[in-house]
Amino acid sequence: GAVVSQHPSRVICKSGTSVKIECRSLDFQATTMFWYRQFPKQSLMLMATSNEGSKATYEQGVEKDKFLINHASLTLSTLTVTSAHPEDSSFYICSARPGGTSGNQETQYFGPGTRLLVL
Amino acid sequence: QKEVEQNSGPLSVPEGAIASLNCTYSDRVSQSFFWYRQYSGKSPELIMSIYSNGDKEDGRFTAQLNKASQYVSLLIRDSQPSDSATYLCAGFSSGSARQLTFGSGTQLTVLP
């Protein structure tokens, strides 16, 4: 149980285009999902917290108009990197926390990550 | 002080030895802790969680929490080369969002 998927696993795009990354909890409902970014040899940096049916909460320094987050259902959150630039190239990882009676509400389960390369 | 601090290593141990990974935390972190393992190029994988003072064992892994000293550790017994990875310590930041805050990770290499 507690499987989180991400799609795509890898994406290469041209500078100025937008990229959408999907995060799904496959076998539990996640009222809260988190989006992280990780640069090489660095730890995870939380970008935003996404709650189902409400606006995401962004961490300081993360542009909400550039990184659009939608959490329309209890099993799906999307991150759209708008007008991507080479400095946005990174490893984007989502995690999901079970809500209600779905399981251990203390634990976050991570998706496999999406590697974005902006040329 | 960072909320969660780890010795970044790298830490090398011979196969079969005990690997000891340590983490300290500040007052801004609540006392639920998690150890994640991250292989190169992959996302973190939960190994253990610990909420209470003392030891918690799961197979070759033992997590230890000392609230008075504000440290949490992970022991890996009978280390295997497949244990070579970066180990991330995480705790919840204070506040209502229950966001995990991560240490910088300790890179472990188990030498065959």
Image (tube, grey):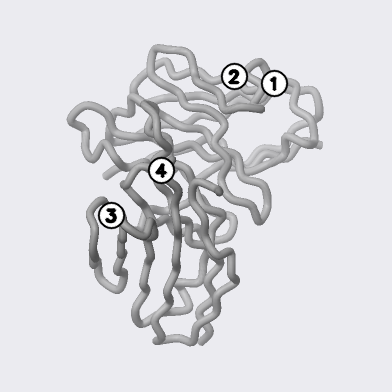
Q: Nearer the viewer, mark 4 or mark 3?
A: 4
The subunit letter for the residue under badge 4 reads B
Residue under the point 51% across and 52% down = B103
x and y, in percent, of residue B39 in the image: 52, 61
Instruction: Same chain for labels 2 and 1? Say yes or no.
Output: yes
Residue A82 badge: 1
Q: Which element is circle 4 on?
A: strand
Residue under the point 37% across and 74% down = B76
Residue under the point 55% across and 79% down = B12
C-alpha separation, residue under disc 1 versus residue under disc 4 = 33 Å
The subunit letter for the residue under badge 3 reads B
Q: Which residue is mark 4?
A: B29
C-alpha separation, residue under disc 4 versus residue under disc 2 = 28 Å
Tag 2: amino acid: Leu
Q: Which residue is mark 2?
A: A68
Q: Which element is circle 2 on?
A: strand
C-alpha separation, residue under disc 2 versus residue under disc 1 = 7 Å
Q: Are marks 4 and 3 in contact (CB under 8 Å)?
A: no
How busy is the neighbourhood of tag 1: few (under 14 within 10 Å), some, or many (20 plus)?
some
Tag 1: amino acid: Thr
Q: Quadrant of the N terminus of chain A?
A: top left
Residue B61 badge: none
Which quadrant of the structure image shows residue B7? Answer: bottom right
Q: Which residue is mark 3?
A: B50
Q: Are marks 2 and 1 in contact (CB under 8 Å)?
A: yes
C-alpha separation, residue under disc 2 versus residue under disc 3 = 34 Å
Tag 4: amino acid: Val
Q: Nearer the viewer, mark 4 or mark 2?
A: 4
Say which label, 4 or 3, has the lower sequence index.
4
Which quadrant of the structure image shows residue B96? Answer: top left
The subunit letter for the residue under badge 1 reads A
